[in-house]
Image: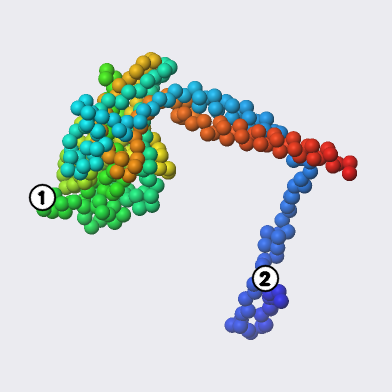
Amino acid sequence: MSPQSYDIPDGAEGNVVETRKPDNTAFKQQRLPAWQPILTPRSVLPTFFIVGIIFIPLGAVLLTVSNNVLEYSSDYTQCQSATGDQCSNLRLNASRTNEPCVCTVNVTVEKNMQNPVYVYYGLSNFFQNHRRYVKSRDDNQLVGNHVTNTSISKDCAPYKVDKVNGSEWPIAPCGAIANSLFNDTFILTGMNIDRTGIAWYTDHSVKFNNPHPANNLVEAFKSYAKPKFWQESVDKLDPGDNANNGYKNEALEVWMRTAAFPTFRKLYGKINVSLPPDNYSFIVNYNYPVTAFEGSKRLIISTTSFMGGKNPFLGIAYIVVGSASLLVGIGLCIIHFATRNK
């Protein structure tokens, strides 16, 4: 039975019967004008050919641009020091974590690389997308607010607090992401690797700010403990540039933007001069352990294009979709002409 509305008799205002009948409007009574396309061969077939004609040349352009990006990499997971020590073995032994291990990574450049040349580090089998890992941070702390043992985010556990001189102090920055900060360093003899201007603008200008007083980081972080796996406190991440310290350190900001896949790369710095073809030797301070979880490390140098770094996927995807569209269009044409007179 459809819902009905009832009139209210005189003197019976207290016995109101509400109606569920929709208002008599075009919208509520579904009387709005509508348009439904009628799919015919004349309207459908051109669409497939247009998509193919547009996508294939566009994909070819994108693929060419990607191939013009110069990229060279070298895996240095098992590199050895000048004394023959396997750096990865030194990092497996927790009692020798602070023992330095310096090795050399060679990268052969075959074509002239126009500046700026970007330096990346790549990690594999490292799951930054784990739910608890991604949550393990305190954005209220990173934006520049002071926190205490009680106000620090519980998501940072078990990297919330640490004992300093017998007292528990909040860790700055807290959480598993910051605690696992990549700390290998690369040196290219005779050239400077600039470690500024590598973070996203929104990260550096909005999401990360140093606590008060921002002009005196030693004072600002005096009541905080450093992360357990760090060798230095957050106010000493970049000894050569005081403006690139604290939460405003760009290497920290890059690391805190977690990767979606277990194999990823992150920007380490940039070389502001061109690199002619040659064999380049990078001196690596090997600090970051990866063999314990069967991971690997790579040093990557690359130029960029208007699309970013070297990535042929988008160009290949456009070509594949355009080719498939053309094939489907041709197939439908054959079927249409073979059956239209029947």
As drawn, 210 above or below 269: below
Residue at (29, 19) in percent of width and height:
191
Q: Which mark is residue 88?
A: none
In the image, taking residue 84 as reference, residue 319 lies left or right, namely: right
Quarter of the figure with residue 53: top right
Crowd band around label 2 with a 10 angstrom C-alpha radius: few (<14), some (14–19), many (20+): few
- Quadrant location of the C terminus? top right
The residue at the far right in this view is 341
Q: Quadrant of residue 50?
A: top right
Q: Nearer the viewer, residue 303 or 262?
A: 262
58 displayed left or right of 289: right
Query: Helix, strand, or loop for circle 2?
Result: loop
- Residue at the disc numbered 1: 165
What's the residue at 21%, 55% (across, down)?
A: 149
Q: Which secondary structure, mark 1?
A: loop
Q: Image quadrant of residue 77?
A: top left
Amino acid under label 1? Asn
Q: Can you identify the residue that label 2 sits on?
A: 21
Could you tell me residue 253's position as x and y percent? 33, 39
Is 155 above or below relative to 143? below
Position of 165 with respect to 257 (left or right) is: left
- Which quadrant of the rendered structure holds the N terminus? bottom right
Residue 216 seen from this side: no
